[in-house]
Amino acid sequence: GSSGSSGLFIKNLNFSTTEETLKGVFSKVGAIKSCTISKKKNKAGVLLSMGFGFVEYKKPEQAQKALKQLQGHTVDGHKLEVRISERATKPASGPSSG
């Protein structure tokens, strides 16, 4: 796509890293629309980090910039793996071709 995606997929997160921490790191690059860390409930019903999350910027350029600047950036002792997420923004109604 010419416009590009403004969403980022972040892997290799420390399980203790919070969305607030992640947002703090990525917001240095540009304005963030949303920041989520994927979680799952354990048997005790406690939400645990799955070690990956998504950050969505307001502009694709900011996502590209963050990709370059924050690739391998250490957060809570873990080197982040950053990728452009193609499925950050949900498509408008109608069947997707492809």
Image: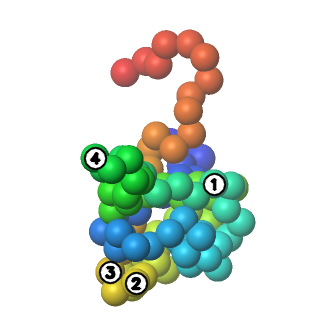
Report which residue position mark 2 lands on: 76
Q: Amino acid at mark 1?
A: Ser
Q: Amino acid at mark 4?
A: Lys
Report which residue position mark 4 lands on: 43
Q: Which mark is residue 51?
A: none
**In the image, what residue occupies the spot 33% across and 50% down?**
44
When the figure is inspected, residue 69 is found, relative to residue 63, above or below; the finding is below
Earlier residue among tags 2 and 4: 4
Asked if the residue at tag 4 contacts the one at tag 2, i.e. Cβ–Cβ closer than 8 Å, the answer is no
**Position in image of residue 34 (x %, y %):** 63, 54
Q: Which one is in front in this view, the residue at disc 2 or the one at disc 4?
A: 4
Q: Amino acid at mark 3?
A: His
Q: Which mark is residue 34?
A: 1
Asked if the residue at tag 1 contacts the one at tag 4, i.e. Cβ–Cβ closer than 8 Å, the answer is no
In 3D space, how far apart are the residues under numbered discs 3 and 2 (Cα atoms)?
6 Å
**Can residue 87 be seen?**
yes
Report which residue position mark 3 lands on: 78
